[in-house]
Amino acid sequence: MKARTHYGTELPGMPRERLTGRLIVIEGADGSGRTTEVERLKEALEIDGHSIVDTGLRRSTLVGEPIDRAKQGHTLAATTLALLYATDFADQLENKIVPSLASGSTVLADRYIYTLMARAVVRGASRAWAQELYSFALRPDLVVFLDARPEILMHRAISKYGSLDYWESGMDMSISPDRFESFLDYQGRLRREFAWMERDYGFHTLDANRHPDQVHEDVRRLVAPLYAPTARRAGTINPRPGSTASG
C-alpha cells in the first residue's frame, strides 16, 4: 500500500499509511455543473456499494458560518479572506477528510484547495505564497476540472439566480463598476490560473460547456480505475491523460 502524500508541510500526527480511502476532487467555477456532477457521482458510487463522504468549501463547523457572515458585509480584505478559507479547509481536513479516509471511505470534494489558491492569486497573492499556505493538503487520487467559458457561466448564473453574485463577479477587486464586465474579467482570470494548475497539479480537464450527461460519462470513465483491483493509492491515475477541454 503506497503511503498517501501531501503537497509540502504535513499536519502533525498525520496517519498516512492508514488512509486507505479514496479522495476525489471535482473542481470548477460556479455554473460549471460541478455541484450537479458531485451529486450524480455520489449517487452512482453509492449504488456501486462504496461509502461516500462529501465535503466542500465553508462546511467547517468552526468557521463556515463566520465566513458567510463576513462575506455578507463585502468588506473582507484579500489576505484575511484567504486565511479564513485556509482555516476552514484545515479544520475539515483534520476532522472530516482524514478520519473518513482512515475508515476506508471515499471522500468526494466539491472543490478543494485549487479554487482557494486561484482566488488568492487573482487578488494579488503570489503563486508561491498560495502554494505554501495550502501545502499541508493531501494529494487527491483524482482531480477533475470542469472547464466552462465565462460567458456560459454568466448565462447559467443569471438563469438560475436572476443575478450575479458579488464575490463570484470579483466586485471586491474594483475591476469594473459594471457587474457583467467584472464577472467576465474575473472568471477569465480564474480560468487562466486553473490552466496553470492543470500543468502543475495534474488536473483532468473536461469540457463543461456540454450537456451534463456527457460530462458525467467522462467523469465516470476517469473514476473507474480508482476501484479496479490493481489500483494504487495516492496517484492512481496517470496525471496527464488526453485532455477533453474546450479551450
Image (cartoon, rainbow, N blue to C red):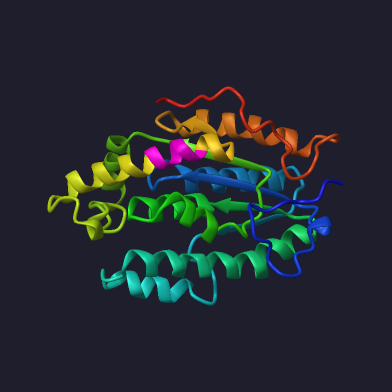
Q: Residue at x 45, y 68 (%)?
A: 83
Q: Position of residue 140 (x, y in %)?
A: 65, 47
Task: Specify whether 35 is left or right of 91.
Answer: left
Front residue of this view, candidates 51 and 194? 194
Task: Specify whether 141 is left or right of 186.
Answer: right
The answer to whether any part of residue 156 appears in the image is: no
The answer to whether any part of residue 220 appears in the image is: yes
Q: Quadrant of residue 187?
A: top left
Q: Position of residue 13 (x, y in %)?
A: 76, 69
Q: Position of residue 45 (x, y in %)?
A: 69, 44
Q: Quadrant of the C terminus?
A: top left
Examine the structure image and report whether residue 242 is included in the region drawn in magenta.
no
Whether 157 is drawn above or below 87: the answer is above
**Predominant secondary structure, magenta span:** helix
Q: Residue at x 78, y 58 (%)?
A: 16
Magenta residues span 192-197
Front residue of this view, candidates 121 and 144? 121
Q: Residue at x 66, y 68 (%)?
A: 94
Q: Position of residue 123 (x, y in %)?
A: 33, 55
Whether 66 is drawn above or below 106: the answer is below
